[in-house]
Amino acid sequence: MNNYNIKYSKIKVLFALLLAAILYSACTKQDDFKKFVEGGEISYTGKLDSVKMFSGDSRVLLTGLFLADPKVVKCKITWNNGKDSVVLPVVKKNAIDTLIYSIPNVAEGLQNFTIYTYDKVGNKSVPVYANARSYGDRYKASLSNRPISSVTADASTGKGIISWLGMDKLTGVFATEVQYTSTNNVIKKIRTKIDSTSTTIPDLKAGTDIQYRTLFLPDTSCVDTFRTAFQTQRVLLDYTGYFKNSGNPFVSDGGSGRWRVLKDWVVSASVKNHGGYGSWCSDQGGTLAMEMGWSNTAAIVDGKIYQSLTLPAGKYNFGIDIGANEAIDPVYIVAAVGNTLPNVNSISTAIAYTNFADKNLQFTLTQPTTVSIGFLATMTTGNQYWVVKGISLKTL
Protein backbone atom coordinates (compact mmCIF):
# COMPACT_ATOMS: atom_id res chain seq x y z
CA MET A 1 0.00 0.00 0.00
CA ASN A 2 1.47 3.33 -0.94
CA ASN A 3 1.68 6.34 1.35
CA TYR A 4 -1.32 8.06 -0.24
CA ASN A 5 -3.63 5.16 0.54
CA ILE A 6 -2.36 4.95 4.10
CA LYS A 7 -3.09 8.65 4.73
CA TYR A 8 -6.52 8.34 3.11
CA SER A 9 -7.40 5.39 5.34
CA LYS A 10 -6.40 7.30 8.45
CA ILE A 11 -8.58 10.24 7.47
CA LYS A 12 -11.59 7.95 7.02
CA VAL A 13 -11.01 6.44 10.46
CA LEU A 14 -10.74 9.88 12.10
CA PHE A 15 -13.88 11.07 10.31
CA ALA A 16 -15.79 8.00 11.48
CA LEU A 17 -14.68 8.55 15.06
CA LEU A 18 -15.66 12.24 14.93
CA LEU A 19 -19.09 11.42 13.49
CA ALA A 20 -19.68 8.84 16.20
CA ALA A 21 -18.78 11.35 18.90
CA ILE A 22 -21.22 13.92 17.46
CA LEU A 23 -24.02 11.38 17.24
CA TYR A 24 -23.39 10.22 20.80
CA SER A 25 -23.41 13.78 22.10
CA ALA A 26 -26.63 14.57 20.28
CA CYS A 27 -28.35 11.51 21.65
CA THR A 28 -27.18 12.32 25.17
CA LYS A 29 -28.51 15.92 24.97
CA GLN A 30 -31.78 14.68 23.55
CA ASP A 31 -32.09 12.18 26.38
CA ASP A 32 -31.31 14.94 28.91
CA PHE A 33 -33.97 17.20 27.36
CA LYS A 34 -36.51 14.42 27.59
CA LYS A 35 -35.99 14.37 31.35
CA PHE A 36 -37.41 17.92 31.50
CA VAL A 37 -40.36 17.42 29.21
CA GLU A 38 -41.57 14.07 30.48
CA GLY A 39 -45.35 14.11 30.27
CA GLY A 40 -45.40 16.74 27.48
CA GLU A 41 -43.90 20.10 26.50
CA ILE A 42 -43.85 23.09 28.90
CA SER A 43 -46.84 25.45 28.38
CA TYR A 44 -46.82 29.00 29.79
CA THR A 45 -49.93 31.13 30.23
CA GLY A 46 -49.88 34.78 29.35
CA LYS A 47 -48.53 36.90 32.22
CA LEU A 48 -50.29 39.88 33.77
CA ASP A 49 -49.20 42.87 31.72
CA SER A 50 -48.70 46.61 32.46
CA VAL A 51 -48.56 45.98 36.21
CA LYS A 52 -48.70 49.00 38.53
CA MET A 53 -48.91 49.07 42.33
CA PHE A 54 -50.04 51.89 44.59
CA SER A 55 -49.52 52.43 48.33
CA GLY A 56 -52.40 52.63 50.80
CA ASP A 57 -53.71 52.34 54.33
CA SER A 58 -52.73 48.81 55.48
CA ARG A 59 -53.19 47.72 51.86
CA VAL A 60 -51.79 48.16 48.37
CA LEU A 61 -53.67 48.50 45.10
CA LEU A 62 -52.71 46.36 42.09
CA THR A 63 -53.65 47.13 38.49
CA GLY A 64 -52.75 45.24 35.32
CA LEU A 65 -53.99 43.87 32.00
CA PHE A 66 -54.97 40.36 30.96
CA LEU A 67 -54.06 40.25 27.31
CA ALA A 68 -55.29 37.89 24.57
CA ASP A 69 -54.49 34.51 26.19
CA PRO A 70 -57.90 32.81 26.68
CA LYS A 71 -56.47 30.03 28.83
CA VAL A 72 -55.96 32.18 31.95
CA VAL A 73 -58.42 31.15 34.70
CA LYS A 74 -56.78 32.51 37.86
CA CYS A 75 -54.16 34.90 39.17
CA LYS A 76 -52.01 34.34 42.27
CA ILE A 77 -50.26 37.12 44.17
CA THR A 78 -47.69 36.36 46.87
CA TRP A 79 -45.72 38.62 49.22
CA ASN A 80 -43.92 38.56 52.56
CA ASN A 81 -41.44 36.04 51.13
CA GLY A 82 -44.32 33.86 49.98
CA LYS A 83 -45.91 33.60 53.43
CA ASP A 84 -48.94 35.62 52.36
CA SER A 85 -50.89 35.13 49.17
CA VAL A 86 -54.22 35.60 47.49
CA VAL A 87 -55.76 33.76 44.50
CA LEU A 88 -58.15 35.60 42.20
CA PRO A 89 -60.46 33.83 39.70
CA VAL A 90 -60.22 35.23 36.19
CA VAL A 91 -63.30 35.25 33.95
CA LYS A 92 -62.44 37.15 30.83
CA LYS A 93 -65.20 39.04 29.06
CA ASN A 94 -63.06 40.82 26.52
CA ALA A 95 -59.90 40.09 24.58
CA ILE A 96 -58.11 42.50 26.89
CA ASP A 97 -59.43 42.83 30.44
CA THR A 98 -58.31 45.05 33.30
CA LEU A 99 -57.45 43.84 36.80
CA ILE A 100 -57.93 46.27 39.67
CA TYR A 101 -57.52 44.64 43.07
CA SER A 102 -56.94 45.98 46.58
CA ILE A 103 -54.69 43.62 48.52
CA PRO A 104 -55.81 43.87 52.17
CA ASN A 105 -53.99 43.38 55.47
CA VAL A 106 -50.54 44.16 54.14
CA ALA A 107 -47.98 44.68 56.91
CA GLU A 108 -46.61 48.21 57.19
CA GLY A 109 -43.52 48.93 55.12
CA LEU A 110 -42.19 48.25 51.63
CA GLN A 111 -43.40 44.88 50.34
CA ASN A 112 -42.28 42.86 47.30
CA PHE A 113 -44.95 41.03 45.30
CA THR A 114 -44.80 38.15 42.79
CA ILE A 115 -47.68 37.61 40.38
CA TYR A 116 -48.49 34.45 38.34
CA THR A 117 -51.38 33.57 36.08
CA TYR A 118 -52.60 29.95 35.63
CA ASP A 119 -54.61 27.95 33.15
CA LYS A 120 -57.14 25.31 34.19
CA VAL A 121 -54.57 22.48 34.25
CA GLY A 122 -52.15 24.40 36.47
CA ASN A 123 -49.66 25.75 33.95
CA LYS A 124 -48.43 29.13 35.14
CA SER A 125 -46.93 32.21 33.58
CA VAL A 126 -43.46 33.55 34.07
CA PRO A 127 -43.38 35.62 37.28
CA VAL A 128 -44.06 39.35 37.34
CA TYR A 129 -42.40 41.30 40.14
CA ALA A 130 -43.58 44.58 41.67
CA ASN A 131 -43.40 46.43 44.98
CA ALA A 132 -45.42 48.97 46.96
CA ARG A 133 -45.52 50.45 50.44
CA SER A 134 -48.25 49.92 53.02
CA TYR A 135 -48.79 52.60 55.68
CA GLY A 136 -50.15 51.63 59.09
CA ASP A 137 -50.15 52.52 62.77
CA ARG A 138 -46.56 53.78 62.87
CA TYR A 139 -47.22 56.33 60.16
CA LYS A 140 -50.55 57.38 61.66
CA ALA A 141 -48.93 57.92 65.07
CA SER A 142 -46.52 60.40 63.50
CA LEU A 143 -49.29 62.69 62.21
CA SER A 144 -50.39 65.86 64.01
CA ASN A 145 -52.96 68.56 63.43
CA ARG A 146 -51.85 71.79 61.81
CA PRO A 147 -51.44 74.48 64.50
CA ILE A 148 -53.72 77.51 64.52
CA SER A 149 -52.62 81.03 65.35
CA SER A 150 -56.12 82.40 65.92
CA VAL A 151 -59.78 82.03 64.95
CA THR A 152 -61.98 85.10 65.01
CA ALA A 153 -65.43 85.86 63.66
CA ASP A 154 -67.11 89.18 63.08
CA ALA A 155 -70.04 89.16 65.49
CA SER A 156 -72.02 91.50 63.28
CA THR A 157 -71.57 89.72 59.90
CA GLY A 158 -70.66 86.10 60.75
CA LYS A 159 -67.46 86.26 58.68
CA GLY A 160 -64.79 84.07 60.27
CA ILE A 161 -61.02 84.10 59.75
CA ILE A 162 -58.66 81.25 60.67
CA SER A 163 -54.98 82.14 60.76
CA TRP A 164 -52.76 79.06 60.32
CA LEU A 165 -49.20 78.39 61.42
CA GLY A 166 -46.72 76.56 59.21
CA MET A 167 -46.17 72.79 58.91
CA ASP A 168 -43.46 70.46 57.58
CA LYS A 169 -44.56 69.31 54.11
CA LEU A 170 -42.29 66.25 54.27
CA THR A 171 -45.00 64.57 56.37
CA GLY A 172 -47.22 64.46 53.27
CA VAL A 173 -49.62 67.13 54.56
CA PHE A 174 -51.63 68.73 51.76
CA ALA A 175 -54.76 70.33 53.27
CA THR A 176 -56.89 71.07 56.31
CA GLU A 177 -60.61 70.46 56.63
CA VAL A 178 -62.82 72.68 58.77
CA GLN A 179 -66.31 71.80 59.97
CA TYR A 180 -68.57 74.55 61.30
CA THR A 181 -72.17 75.58 61.95
CA SER A 182 -73.47 78.17 59.52
CA THR A 183 -75.73 81.10 60.32
CA ASN A 184 -78.59 78.90 58.95
CA ASN A 185 -77.76 76.11 61.46
CA VAL A 186 -76.34 73.84 58.73
CA ILE A 187 -73.18 71.82 59.37
CA LYS A 188 -70.72 72.71 56.60
CA LYS A 189 -67.17 71.75 55.64
CA ILE A 190 -64.51 73.80 53.96
CA ARG A 191 -61.06 72.64 52.75
CA THR A 192 -57.92 74.76 52.63
CA LYS A 193 -54.66 73.92 50.84
CA ILE A 194 -51.59 73.66 53.03
CA ASP A 195 -49.93 76.60 51.24
CA SER A 196 -52.69 78.97 52.39
CA THR A 197 -52.00 80.87 55.59
CA SER A 198 -55.65 81.72 56.29
CA THR A 199 -59.17 80.43 55.76
CA THR A 200 -62.27 82.59 55.42
CA ILE A 201 -65.61 81.27 56.66
CA PRO A 202 -68.35 83.45 55.19
CA ASP A 203 -71.28 82.42 57.41
CA LEU A 204 -70.08 81.23 60.82
CA LYS A 205 -72.80 81.20 63.46
CA ALA A 206 -71.94 83.46 66.38
CA GLY A 207 -71.16 81.67 69.62
CA THR A 208 -70.22 78.35 67.98
CA ASP A 209 -66.80 76.70 67.77
CA ILE A 210 -65.12 75.06 64.79
CA GLN A 211 -63.72 71.53 64.40
CA TYR A 212 -60.74 70.93 62.16
CA ARG A 213 -58.44 68.13 61.02
CA THR A 214 -55.39 67.79 58.79
CA LEU A 215 -55.12 65.64 55.64
CA PHE A 216 -52.05 63.72 54.45
CA LEU A 217 -50.87 61.77 51.40
CA PRO A 218 -47.54 60.15 52.33
CA ASP A 219 -46.41 59.69 48.72
CA THR A 220 -47.59 60.52 45.22
CA SER A 221 -48.77 56.95 44.51
CA CYS A 222 -50.92 56.65 47.64
CA VAL A 223 -54.60 55.90 47.03
CA ASP A 224 -55.74 56.60 50.61
CA THR A 225 -55.98 59.93 52.42
CA PHE A 226 -54.87 59.92 56.04
CA ARG A 227 -56.59 62.26 58.52
CA THR A 228 -56.01 63.37 62.07
CA ALA A 229 -58.94 63.28 64.47
CA PHE A 230 -61.18 66.35 64.55
CA GLN A 231 -60.03 68.92 67.11
CA THR A 232 -62.25 71.65 68.52
CA GLN A 233 -61.04 75.24 68.41
CA ARG A 234 -62.80 78.06 70.20
CA VAL A 235 -63.78 81.02 68.05
CA LEU A 236 -63.07 84.49 69.42
CA LEU A 237 -65.86 86.84 68.41
CA ASP A 238 -64.85 90.20 67.03
CA TYR A 239 -67.24 92.93 68.13
CA THR A 240 -65.24 95.75 66.56
CA GLY A 241 -68.00 96.04 63.98
CA TYR A 242 -70.38 97.10 66.76
CA PHE A 243 -68.44 100.35 66.84
CA LYS A 244 -69.04 102.97 64.22
CA ASN A 245 -65.84 104.53 62.89
CA SER A 246 -63.27 102.18 64.47
CA GLY A 247 -60.17 103.74 62.91
CA ASN A 248 -57.21 103.03 60.65
CA PRO A 249 -58.03 105.73 59.75
CA PHE A 250 -60.70 107.44 61.82
CA VAL A 251 -63.21 109.66 60.01
CA SER A 252 -64.17 113.17 61.05
CA ASP A 253 -67.60 114.75 60.81
CA GLY A 254 -66.29 117.23 58.25
CA GLY A 255 -64.08 120.28 58.14
CA SER A 256 -60.72 121.14 56.67
CA GLY A 257 -58.33 121.88 59.50
CA ARG A 258 -55.89 119.70 61.37
CA TRP A 259 -58.34 119.40 64.28
CA ARG A 260 -61.95 118.31 63.78
CA VAL A 261 -64.59 116.27 65.65
CA LEU A 262 -64.82 112.50 65.42
CA LYS A 263 -67.79 111.15 63.55
CA ASP A 264 -70.12 108.77 65.48
CA TRP A 265 -68.32 109.18 68.82
CA VAL A 266 -69.54 111.11 71.86
CA VAL A 267 -67.01 113.87 72.58
CA SER A 268 -67.18 116.05 75.70
CA ALA A 269 -66.92 119.81 75.35
CA SER A 270 -63.54 120.05 77.12
CA VAL A 271 -61.89 117.92 74.42
CA LYS A 272 -62.96 120.44 71.74
CA ASN A 273 -60.25 122.86 72.83
CA HIS A 274 -59.06 123.83 69.36
CA GLY A 275 -61.56 126.57 68.61
CA GLY A 276 -64.53 124.25 69.05
CA TYR A 277 -62.77 121.28 67.43
CA GLY A 278 -60.92 118.33 68.89
CA SER A 279 -60.96 114.52 69.23
CA TRP A 280 -60.00 114.02 65.54
CA CYS A 281 -56.55 114.92 64.28
CA SER A 282 -55.22 114.68 60.72
CA ASP A 283 -51.91 113.26 61.99
CA GLN A 284 -51.08 109.79 60.60
CA GLY A 285 -53.98 109.91 58.19
CA GLY A 286 -56.76 110.49 60.71
CA THR A 287 -56.59 109.63 64.40
CA LEU A 288 -58.50 109.83 67.69
CA ALA A 289 -56.60 112.25 69.91
CA MET A 290 -56.47 114.75 72.78
CA GLU A 291 -53.99 117.62 73.06
CA MET A 292 -53.44 120.57 75.41
CA GLY A 293 -50.72 123.19 75.93
CA TRP A 294 -48.40 124.95 73.53
CA SER A 295 -49.71 128.32 74.76
CA ASN A 296 -52.89 128.24 72.72
CA THR A 297 -54.74 125.12 73.80
CA ALA A 298 -56.81 124.99 76.99
CA ALA A 299 -56.53 122.29 79.62
CA ILE A 300 -58.86 119.32 79.36
CA VAL A 301 -60.93 118.42 82.44
CA ASP A 302 -62.84 115.13 82.48
CA GLY A 303 -62.33 114.81 78.75
CA LYS A 304 -64.35 111.89 77.32
CA ILE A 305 -64.39 110.17 73.94
CA TYR A 306 -66.60 107.08 73.84
CA GLN A 307 -69.37 105.04 72.23
CA SER A 308 -72.24 103.12 73.87
CA LEU A 309 -73.28 99.66 72.68
CA THR A 310 -75.16 96.61 73.94
CA LEU A 311 -73.10 93.42 74.27
CA PRO A 312 -74.02 89.83 75.20
CA ALA A 313 -72.55 88.12 78.25
CA GLY A 314 -68.89 87.26 77.85
CA LYS A 315 -65.28 88.16 78.53
CA TYR A 316 -63.95 90.99 76.37
CA ASN A 317 -60.74 92.70 75.39
CA PHE A 318 -60.82 96.29 74.16
CA GLY A 319 -57.54 96.97 72.39
CA ILE A 320 -56.03 100.16 71.02
CA ASP A 321 -53.35 100.86 68.41
CA ILE A 322 -51.34 103.74 69.83
CA GLY A 323 -49.89 106.21 67.35
CA ALA A 324 -48.21 108.46 69.91
CA ASN A 325 -48.18 108.85 73.69
CA GLU A 326 -46.81 112.10 75.10
CA ALA A 327 -49.29 112.18 77.98
CA ILE A 328 -48.10 113.65 81.28
CA ASP A 329 -51.31 113.35 83.31
CA PRO A 330 -53.10 109.97 83.57
CA VAL A 331 -55.13 108.88 80.57
CA TYR A 332 -57.52 105.95 81.02
CA ILE A 333 -59.23 103.36 78.87
CA VAL A 334 -62.64 102.77 80.47
CA ALA A 335 -65.69 100.50 80.24
CA ALA A 336 -68.75 101.54 82.25
CA VAL A 337 -72.36 100.38 82.49
CA GLY A 338 -74.82 102.75 80.85
CA ASN A 339 -74.67 105.46 78.22
CA THR A 340 -71.80 107.57 79.53
CA LEU A 341 -68.39 107.41 81.17
CA PRO A 342 -67.83 108.55 84.77
CA ASN A 343 -65.67 111.55 85.65
CA VAL A 344 -62.06 110.94 86.64
CA ASN A 345 -62.80 111.22 90.37
CA SER A 346 -65.52 108.54 90.03
CA ILE A 347 -63.59 106.17 87.80
CA SER A 348 -63.81 103.39 90.40
CA THR A 349 -67.51 103.02 89.52
CA ALA A 350 -66.62 101.73 86.06
CA ILE A 351 -66.72 98.03 85.20
CA ALA A 352 -63.02 98.21 84.37
CA TYR A 353 -60.33 100.77 83.59
CA THR A 354 -56.60 100.83 82.96
CA ASN A 355 -53.81 103.19 81.93
CA PHE A 356 -53.81 104.18 78.29
CA ALA A 357 -50.24 102.86 77.90
CA ASP A 358 -51.42 99.30 78.67
CA LYS A 359 -53.12 99.22 75.24
CA ASN A 360 -55.68 96.60 76.37
CA LEU A 361 -58.66 96.70 78.71
CA GLN A 362 -60.36 93.48 79.77
CA PHE A 363 -63.80 93.23 81.31
CA THR A 364 -66.56 90.68 81.90
CA LEU A 365 -70.33 90.91 81.42
CA THR A 366 -72.50 88.31 83.16
CA GLN A 367 -75.57 89.22 81.10
CA PRO A 368 -76.46 91.32 78.06
CA THR A 369 -75.51 94.87 79.04
CA THR A 370 -75.36 98.36 77.57
CA VAL A 371 -71.85 99.67 78.15
CA SER A 372 -69.89 102.77 77.22
CA ILE A 373 -66.31 102.17 76.14
CA GLY A 374 -63.67 104.78 75.40
CA PHE A 375 -61.14 107.23 76.77
CA LEU A 376 -61.11 109.46 79.85
CA ALA A 377 -58.50 112.05 80.85
CA THR A 378 -57.90 115.27 82.77
CA MET A 379 -54.89 116.97 81.17
CA THR A 380 -53.71 120.17 82.88
CA THR A 381 -49.92 119.93 83.04
CA GLY A 382 -47.54 121.41 80.47
CA ASN A 383 -47.69 120.39 76.84
CA GLN A 384 -49.05 116.93 76.15
CA TYR A 385 -50.97 114.86 73.64
CA TRP A 386 -51.79 111.29 72.71
CA VAL A 387 -52.99 109.62 69.50
CA VAL A 388 -54.87 106.37 68.73
CA LYS A 389 -54.88 104.94 65.19
CA GLY A 390 -57.54 102.26 65.69
CA ILE A 391 -59.51 100.20 68.19
CA SER A 392 -60.78 96.62 68.48
CA LEU A 393 -63.17 94.67 70.69
CA LYS A 394 -62.94 90.87 70.86
CA THR A 395 -64.00 88.09 73.21
CA LEU A 396 -61.43 86.26 75.27
Image: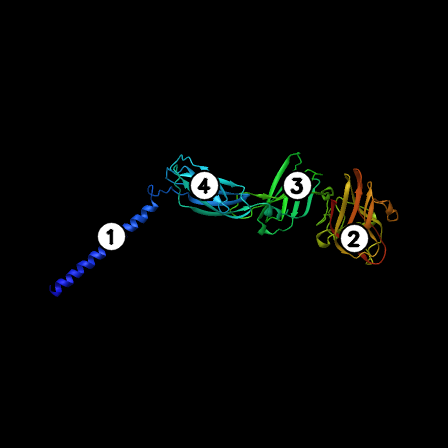
- Secondary element under disc 1, as helix, strand or loop, is helix
Disc 3 residue type? Gln
Mark whose residue sits in front, 1 or 3: 1
**Upstream in sequence: badge 2 or badge 3:** 3
The residue beneath circle 3 is 211
**Upstream in sequence: badge 4 or badge 2:** 4
Q: Quadrant of residue 91?
A: top left
119 is higher (above) or lower (below) than 299: above
Q: Who is closer to the viewer here, 328 or 160? A: 160
Disc 1 residue type? Leu
Q: CA distance from mark 4 to mark 2?
A: 74 Å
**Upstream in sequence: badge 3 or badge 4:** 4
Q: CA distance from mark 2 to mark 3?
A: 34 Å
Q: CA distance from mark 3 to mark 4?
A: 45 Å
Disc 2 residue type? Asp
Q: Are marks 4 and 2 in contact (CB under 8 Å)?
A: no
Q: Who is closer to the viewer here, 97 or 306? A: 97
- Secondary element under disc 3, as helix, strand or loop, is strand
Q: Position of residue 8 (x, y in %)?
A: 15, 61
The residue beneath circle 4 is 76
Q: Quadrant of residue 371?
A: top right
